[in-house]
Amino acid sequence: MTILAIETSCDETAAAVLRNGVMRANIIYSQTEHLKYGGVVPELASRAHIAKIHSVVQEALVKSDTMLGDIDLVAATCGPGLIGSLHVGLTFAKGLALARSLPLLGINHLEGHLYSATIEYPQLQPPFLCLIVSGGHTILANVLDYGECKILGQTQDDAAGEAFDKVAKILGLPYPGGPALERTAATGDPHYVDFPVAQLRQAPFDFSFSGLKTAVLYHAQALSEQERQRRLPDIAASFQRAVTRALSKSLVAAMEATGETSVALVGGVAQNNTLRQHLQSLVEAGAGTFFAPSAEYCADNAGMIAQAAYLLAGKRPPSPLSLSAVPNLPLATINADGEPSPVLQS
Ligand code: KG4
Ligand code: ZN
């Protein structure tokens, strides 16, 4: 079975080919158009996807030695994400499916992240806990089976990656903020400031990062410019420690509450080495097994969309060509009766 997958939900134009469960190509073009604006400009993102989609798909086919006639299934991200960006990839996939009479499978971007660690770690199988930490989402989920998960907690305000990006901006670091902040924190003292970690008593698995962001802002504003520059690594390291503590707290509570011992850390922020190492130690201290994808499968990529399609194809019918892109598509969950809720709206 050969799957061609396309992912264009934000500012990465990506295509992948998965053949019989083996990733043969995972091509990612990260748009540089947004750098000078300090954030993703949706209209520019759509235009850049249009300019790049054909060559990125072509590259994936060539690298994987795949002819159009070899493809059995076309998968594409149908949400959540930027509506214009989603449309480019989904419409391209629909065109290909229509022209070649191939089945189409719309994939939820979050389900892509959810199963992304299984690409390199096939031993990771449901049930497991998955912490998705990306620029737009922070979700702690219990994956019960392929296509069935229970959301245990999520952020009540900013996503973890969003907090990294906003704090990086406050500290005058370049965009994208996450990697810049991690580099700055490398030489800093993580115990310089005890930034607050939100305690959400009613929702012990939820997260909140907006108070932390404000605390960093107030701290930075209280320092002279010279002192702020001198303390930059210490502030960055202290912030990174606070985010790590917040994520650890909910994860440990979820391990205890569910009894799950397999834990995956996924999404763009999962590239953060301090976070990875800390969570790995915690999980292993609790006699669990920790999984995190390598960088190419943490950030947005089509490989994870292909993998989700591979795992879900037998469980879901092909999507109609009328399938819509849905900017706020929620992660599929199970309801109180244990029945899966509908994943895709067409
Ligand atoms: O999953 P992703 O590529 O895109 C979304 O679906 O949102 O995640 C992007 C996020 C950005 O907020 C970026 O700053 C963050 O991941 N990020 C990091 C690191 N690398 C990327 N955050 C912390 N440390 C990093 N090394
Ligand atoms: Zn993502």
Image (spheres, grey):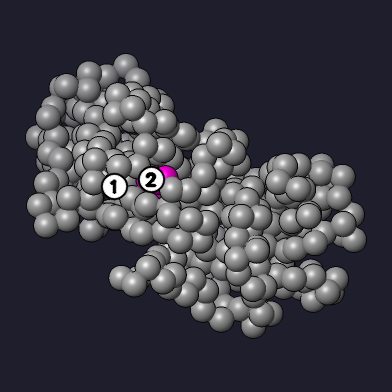
Q: On the picture, is 242 further left or further right than 101?
A: left
Could you tell me if residue 114 is visible in this image? Answer: yes
Residue topped by disc 2: 129
Which one is in front in this view, the residue at disc 2 or the one at disc 1? 1
Residue nearer the viewer, 337 or 71: 337
> Which mark sits nearer the N-terminus, 2 or 1?
2
Q: Main secondary structure of the magenta part?
A: strand
Q: Residue at x 41, y 27 (%)?
A: 273
Q: Compared to 80, does 173 lie above or below?
A: above
Q: Residue at x 37, y 37 (%)?
A: 261
Residue neighbourhood size for the residue with mark 2, other residues' Cα within 10 Å, grouped as few (<14), some (14–19), many (≥20): many
Q: Which mark is residue 258?
A: 1
**Helix, strand or loop under label 2:** strand
Q: On the picture, is 3 further left or further right than 13?
A: right
| Residue 29 pos. (x, y %) | 65, 47
Q: On the picture, is 166 further left or further right than 8?
A: left
Q: Amino acid at mark 2?
A: Leu
**Helix, strand or loop under label 1:** helix
Q: Amino acid at mark 1?
A: Thr
Q: Residue 196 is drawn in which quadrant?
A: top left
Asked whether the beta carbons under mark 2 and mark 1 sit within 8 Å of each other, the answer is yes
The stretch of residues the image draws in magenta is 128-132
Q: Which quadrant does the N terminus fall into?
A: bottom right
Could you tell me if residue 13 is visible in this image? Answer: no
Q: Residue at x 16, y 21 (%)?
A: 191
| Residue 154 pos. (x, y %) | 29, 55
